[in-house]
Each structure stands twice: as C-alpha cells, then as structure tokens.
Amino acid sequence: VRACEELRRTLPVKYDYRFMSSGLLMHAFEFELERARSANELAEYVNIATQCADIGLVPLHSVRNTYVRVREVLESHGAATAIDALLNCAGQRVEQKNPTRVEDVTPWTLTRNDPNLDAKIVTACMDVKNRGFAIIDGALGFPSADAVRVALEKHAERTKAQFTKGELDQSERHVIGDAAVDKIRDDSITWLTGDEMMFDSGLVGAFAQFMRVTMLNPLHLALGGDKVLAPVDSYISNTMLSVYEPGARGFVAHVDNMGPHVDPRALTAIYYPMSSTPSDGGALALFPDDPERIVRITPTADRLVLFASARVPHAVEARCLDAKST
C-alpha cells in the first residue's frame, strides 16, 4: 500500500485533484490481475487494492466489482486457501452487513448500491423527464443518514479555513434582470473529491463517491439510453459541500448548464444532511416551467433533490439571522 501511495505521488501526469488518479491506479491493479500466476496472487492483489481503497487511492466501487469477479473465479476453481485469504481481508469489508447503528456505517456500506434507493432514483428520473425535478425523502435511511450528517458537520468544522466564498461562474447568468441582485451568492464552499478517508471513519470521502458513482448506477439504468450521462468510471466533477450561515443572502436564480459548450452538467443532485424550518429561510426555489411558478423545497435531513441542469432555473432563498447553519 505504501508503494501504491508513492506511485500516485510520482505519476508523470499531474491532476488537479489527487483522486482523479484513482482510476489510473485501479487500471494498474487490473493489469496485474490479468497476469497473476496463481490463485493466491489473485487474492493478494485484491486484498492490496481493498486496503488502497480504505485510504482513498482507488475507488471503492471498482474494488467491490473486482472482488466479486475474482471470488467467482476462485470458487469455480476450488481454490480454498486463496478464498480464505480473500474473505479474511477484502471480504470483511465488501461483504459487511447492512448497519443497524450509526457506528456500524462504513465507507463500504455507504457506497453499496441499495435496491430500494436504486428503485426510487429510477422512478425519480421519470419525474425529472416529465416535470424537470424530483424529490426523494429518506434517501440513505437510518443509520447511514445520521452517520453522514455527523461526518460532514465534523469535516466542515475541522476544515473551516479551507472553505471559500462561492462565486458566480460563466454558467450563472442574469435570470432575474436586476444587476444588483444578480450578483448574489452568499454561501461558503469546499470540494469533496472522494479521497477524504483519513478522518470521520472515511465517511466524507465515501459520501463523495456515493454522490458521484453509487447514484450514477441507477441513473444510467433510467437515462443511459438517452446518452446524457458520463460513464460511471469517468471523473467529471467533485462533490460541492456548501454552507449557508445565518443571515446569508442566498443564491441568485440561475441554471447550472447554459449549453453543451459551456457546461457539461446534465443532472444536478442536491443532498440535505440536516433540516431547517420554513421560517429559517434557505429554501431551494425551483422554476421548472417559467419564472412565475415557484416550487419551494425546504431543506430536510436525508432529502435528495434531482433536477435537469439545463431546464430548471433555481435559487436559494435568504436565511434568517437566527437560523442554524445548513
């Protein structure tokens, strides 16, 4: 594992974010797996890859898929010793039972595709096609949602100095028409890449991988035929963690995709780890049909909102001075 860390550090290609190299390193593992000289070597390579995933060197989902494939090969050849070695390392992570307590939630359980959530996401995609947006409540469920909330709160507090003021980019155009209002964006942001595995039980990095990969599997099932989504293994964007403090003025109405040559986003996903009340302000305002029709969505813990990035202008409303940070 230390050698793999050194390999990433000395890669001849420099990436904007370290986790962008995770797919490349996983390809190196796949290369070695194809050339393994014995069943024991196969198990050893997967076990090393699993430990690399634990510290954010390679994607969790890639290792999970490799583990399943290699275990089937070993079982088909009756390689008992290699199977035992595989189960005692990689198997203990990949095949963890669904957690019943917050402390039992791990990166491996969080990023595993859950059939119930996958079905909700597929159904939600139909709503996005028909009306431009969809809401999924109870997305992660207990105890995963609670574990993610605690991990994100700790991460935000520990890395407060790394947050920067959110800025308007080229895709955020003047929708309202008042130049003074159009420049408002009053949140603080940081980017989660997927390799934040050294603190908070690795759940912050795992949550970023959940948003980028775990969700993308059912999305491809529902929308893949439209060829609007990037491949699951592609690295298109990081997960943005945004905080609106009490008294924040919100975020001007905008769309996330102003055209294919400006921004590649096809679908925007917003996850709320904690709740606020309507009186707190900070609601997400969607304009799915025209600027006169407003759909207000109150931040609610474990709520996932999906909407078409190019079709749906949206804004974040101002927060009250006595509201909690969300």
Image (cartoon, helix red, strand yellow):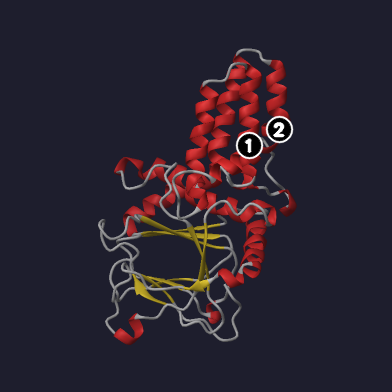
Q: Is residue 252 above or below residue 12?
A: below
Residue 285 horizontal/vertical position (percent): 41, 72
Disc number for residue 50:
1
Which circle's residue, 2 or 1, is located before the other in the chain? 1
Residue 160 horizontal/vertical position (percent): 60, 71
Residue at screen point 30% across, 61% down: 310
Residue at screen point 64% across, 44% down: 54
As measured in the structure, the alpha-carbon distance from the residue carrying label 2 to the one carrying label 1 is 8 Å
Q: Work out which quarter of the rendered image holds the C terminus and state it.
A: bottom right
Secondary structure type for disc 1: helix
Whether pointer 2 and pointer 1 mark residues with C-beta atoms closer than 8 Å, the reply is yes
**Between residues 276 and 56, which one lies in front from this camera angle?**
56
Q: Is residue 287 above or below residue 239?
A: below
Counting labels gives: 2
Residue 155 horizontal/vertical position (percent): 63, 64
Q: Which residue is mark 2?
A: 89
